[in-house]
Amino acid sequence: MTSPEAAVPPRVDRPDRPDRSSLVVRSAQAVGEPDVTVTVIVHNDAERLPRAVESLRAQTHRAIEIIISDDHSTDDTPRVARALADLDDRITVLRLPENSGGCSVPRNRALDIARAPYVMFLDSDDELPPRAVESLLAAHREQRVDFVMGAVERVRVDTGRTTTWMPHLVAERRTVRGIGSEPGLLFEHLATSKMYRTEFLDRHRLRFPEGIHYEDQLFSAQAYCLAEAFTVVPDHVYRWYIAPLAAAGSASISNQRHKLGNVRDRVHVQRLIDEFLVETGHTDLRPDKDHKFLKHDFRMYAGDLPHRDDAWLAGFAELVNPYLATLAPAAYARLTRPERVVLQLVRDGRLDEARVAARGLAQKVAPRTVSAGTDGRLYWGDRVPATSAGRRELDLADERVDSGPFSSTLFRHEILSVAQGPGAVVDLVVRSYDPGLRLAVGPQAALLAIAPGRRRLEVPFRLDPVRPGVFEGRVRLDLAQAPVPVRGFVGARHPVVVLTQDGQRNTGPLLAPLGFPAMSTRVGYHGGLAPHDITVEPEPQGAGRLQIRWAPKGLPARVFQAARAGALRAGLRGGGRPRR
């Protein structure tokens, strides 16, 4: 894979006609001058391409040019693209002579032949809400700005749940006079959520970097820095379909974090952005840009650390540590303590401990052990850090593991073993860590609680001391006794451990072994009208809690599916704000 020689945008010459090495198919019917060109990039996605294009044909603003830029697909995509062009004289099909392996080349080649004064980008597996073009174009026509950006609706394909990407950044309509006045917008690095003035891109020779992944991040950073003004609108202008559980071979670039090459590409792009900031006199943005890298980019990998083997962890540290050493100290100071702990453990080469600490990123949990310094302060892990930087980052004073109300004290509850018993019974061995020594010496009364509806199933069990600050107990959980609502329940729940002291209850997550195979069973009509399939498994993402899923069967299941499909359709119609 090649890389650009410099971080500055490459020279762009807009030809009068497309490069003859690419195949361009325009409709035979004459086309009027478009106001906006929307480029749809596609590679081997014949199934979803019609949905993306249909979302453009359904736009309320009709004067658009649609360029399908095919990155040399080898499936049925070329035929599907030509058939779509036959349906609408606004569609042009551009087929690259060879596959580029990324998003940049098909976007850049489409930009070279775009005819409209404004341009947008769409991926073939996503959509534009019906009023997206109208909304962004109206903002352009209100005042001259270099680009307009809007809100992105994220839709999980497995659950249908919709959320807004970076909602706090797009909640208010405003015009920003230079990124320096709102550097936090660097977090919104998607090129697809924006409509650009074509003249702005050409004047600055701004194109997507070819030969690398995470091209959006460099392109967007350059656009932010080069723009004199841009407008933010709170309307949803892009619908981004997320498949977090997609198979590795079909996952998006962002979901291929298990590949060390993915880490290498992301770090490389960060270095290119840093070079660009220096070359264009925007070094004052480094602390904000570095904070964005730590809070977003590194954080994504950090959440995956419990699932990675030793070789991957070593390779990861080798790739990221040299770059982490170059980041502004102020960027670290703005992070939460659990994030700072994981970062410091990675930087110190304490990779096994980083894996353990990373399970506290998504859920507040204590470390297994703490160490007391000569100053009486507690530090993460079994030894006091040797450096002042380590002591600063691993200091747990603000985590309250040894002080404060019992109800907010951090404990750590881990499952040592999971065994399937008769029927819907699951036998667990639970180990609880009390590094702040908040629990009294001797056996502790505990509850395991779970609620597939409004009522909870609470199973009492005893935690016996193993050594100071460590307790262990056995609990038998009969899921057939869980009070399922009368109409049934579909979804996942995570059991919690409840401890009580002096009338105060402390509730903490229950972390599961990450490798145990899923266990499934069916329960009858107990507590409701429908039988349910119940699956016990480790949570696939996040902290890796014990997860239990219910799925109603029979007629109630069909009712659930129909209601869910109707809610999803209602939430996606009109491009309005997502249902929460």
Image (cartoon, rainbow, N blue to C red):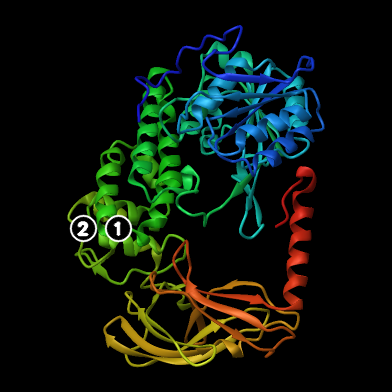
Q: Determine crowd level at label 2: few under 14, some 14-19, many 20+ residues with C-alpha closer than 10 A.
A: some
Q: Who comes first in sequence, dot 1 or dot 2?
A: 2
Q: As displayed, is residue 88 above or below residue 20?
A: below
Q: Secondary structure at mark 2?
A: loop
Disc 1 + disc 2, Cβ < 8 Å:
yes
The image quarter in which residue 199 lies? top right
Image-based side of 313 in relation to 283, left or right: left
Determine which residue is flagged by label 2. Answer: 385
* Residue 385 x, y percent position in the rendering: 21, 58
Image-based side of 320 in relation to 76, left or right: left
Looking at the rendered structure, the kind of residue marked 2 is Pro
Image-based side of 87 in relation to 164, left or right: right
The reply to whether residue 250 is visible in this rendering is yes
Where residue 394 is drawn, which disc sits there? 1
* Residue 439 x, y percent position in the rendering: 37, 84
> How many numbered marks does the figure carry?
2
The reply to whether residue 395 is visible in this rendering is no
* Residue 328 x, y percent position in the rendering: 34, 37
Residue furthest to the top: 16
The image quarter in which residue 46 lies? top right
Image-based side of 240 in relation to 283, left or right: right
Residue placed most toward the observer, 41 or 462: 41
